[in-house]
Each structure stands twice: as C-alpha cells, then as structure tokens.
Amino acid sequence: MRALVVEDDRRIAEDLARALTSAGFRVENVADGEAAWFQGGTEAYDLIVLDLGLPRLDGLTVLKRWRAEGVEAPVLVLTARGAWTERVEGIDAGADDYLPKPFRMEELLARARALVRRSGGLATAQQEVGALSVDLNRMTVALRGVPVSMTPLEFRVIAYLALHRSRMVPPTELIEHLYGDDDAKEANAVEAIIARLRRKLGAGVIGTRRGFGYYLEGAQA
C-alpha cells in the first residue's frame, strides 16, 4: 500500500513515515501545498495524510483541488486547528477523516487502516479469501490456518490483492503501489515476488489472467 504524507514539520513527518512504514505502507513525503497538489494529482495512493497548515498552498485548498480533479484516494486530515467549524469545512471539502494535533500515533494508524479498508469495501481487518487468511492489522498471512512467513514486500502484495479482491490487479498498478519513486519500477520485479509467493503458498493461490493481471483464488475476480 502506498501513502503520501503531507506535513511541513520535519519531526512529525519523520514520525509519521516511520509509523506508517511499520504498518505496511510505502511512504512518500512532501512538505508544501504546491508539491502536494502536484504529487497527489499525478500519482496513485492508497492513503493521503494531509496537514492543513502548509506553506505555499494551504491544505484545504489542496484537498478541494484534488477532489475537483477526480482524486479519489482516502484523505486523513491532520491539523492543529481545533474549532469544530474548521473540522466541518475539512470534511465538506472531501476529507474522509479528521485528527487534531496532538494525536496518538496508535490512533492515527487505526484510522489509516480503517480508511484503506473502507476504500476497498472491506469492513474488518481479518480477510478470508479462499484458503488464505490475511490480517491487515497484524500483517500476518495464514494458509488453511497455518501461519506463513512473509517479507514486508510479499505481505504488501498479498494485502493489496486482498484489498482489491473484487477485480484483477494489473502488474503496472502493483508496481505503482509497491515501489517509491527511488526504486526501479520493472514488471519483472513484480513477477519475481509473485513467483516467491507461489512457492510459499502453492501455485493455485494467486491466479493470473494474461493481459489483465493478478487475483487471489476464491475472490470474485
């Protein structure tokens, strides 16, 4: 899963990136509103954490522009502003959730996971897909009740396929959501991860429809 953190306070941005990375997200940071508007409008994200008090372009304006331009990624707004009228304004502008500063990182992660689940049409963190059991909170995978060891990258692939279980996921989409801008984005990298997962889980767990993409067997792909 790919997350964009928009925060001009370097310490908070680093704390957010560290926490979200530990929760299974691939995190990218920007520190001003103009960079956020461009990045969020040109790249695909599973989650955006947006501070409203930004330099160059305020967060509320960025959010309104994203929504007007068709950006559908779930947005969790962070702000030091405490007035209920400003919270309402943020929600009306298109925010999916709102968390005032200071906040507990555990609460932010819980809200972030919930937003990602809801965007995928999932009600709970525990997902049963065919023979697989995927826990999106604990970042664990079991096959027919037996735990299977996963690297962080392997888990992100399984989690993304589980979150988008109702359709096939093209390799290009997996690449965009697994790798940051500083990584090589090559189709054979995804193929190598899928091959490793099939060795661990069995050849029939991850299906492929050539020319369309990957899906988990047992899902409605």
Image (tube, rainbow, N blue to C red):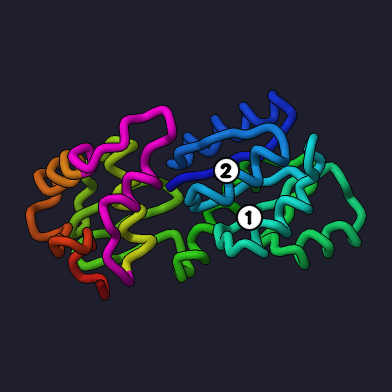
Could you say where residue 212 lies in the image, as x and y percent from the top left? 21, 63
Q: Residue furthest bottom?
A: 220
Label drawn at residue 39: 2
* Residue visible at 80% across and 45% down in the picture: 58
Verify whether residue 180 appears in magenta: yes
* Residue visible at 43% across and 41% down in the picture: 24
Give the side of residue 121 with respect to residue 85, left or right.
Answer: left
- Please tell me whether residue 148 is drawn above or below residue 84 in the rendered image: above
Could you say where residue 38 lies in the image, as x and y percent from the top left? 61, 44
Q: Quadrant of the C terminus?
A: bottom left
Quarter assignment of residue 56: top right
- Please tell me whether residue 13 is drawn above or below residue 136 in the rendered image: above
Give the side of residue 154 with respect to residue 38, left or right.
Answer: left
- Please tell me whether residue 53 is drawn above or below residue 218 in the rendered image: above
Could you tell me the amino acid type at mark 2? Answer: Gln
Mark 1 is surrounded, within 10 Å at the Cα level, by few (under 14), some (14 to 19) or many (20 or more) other residues, namely many
**Mark 1 and mark 2: Cα distance apart in space:** 14 Å
Give the number of marks.
2
Verify whether residue 216 appears in magenta: no
First in sequence: mark 1 or mark 2? 2
Magenta stretch: give its range: 166-190
* Residue visible at 42% across and 28% down in the picture: 182
In depth, the one of 210 and 85 nearer the eye is 210
Front label number (1 vs 2): 2
* Residue visible at 49% across and 47% down in the picture: 43
Could you say where residue 79 lies in the image, as x and y percent from the top left? 79, 45
Could you tell me the amino acid type at mark 1? Answer: Val
- Provide the residue designation for mark 1: 75
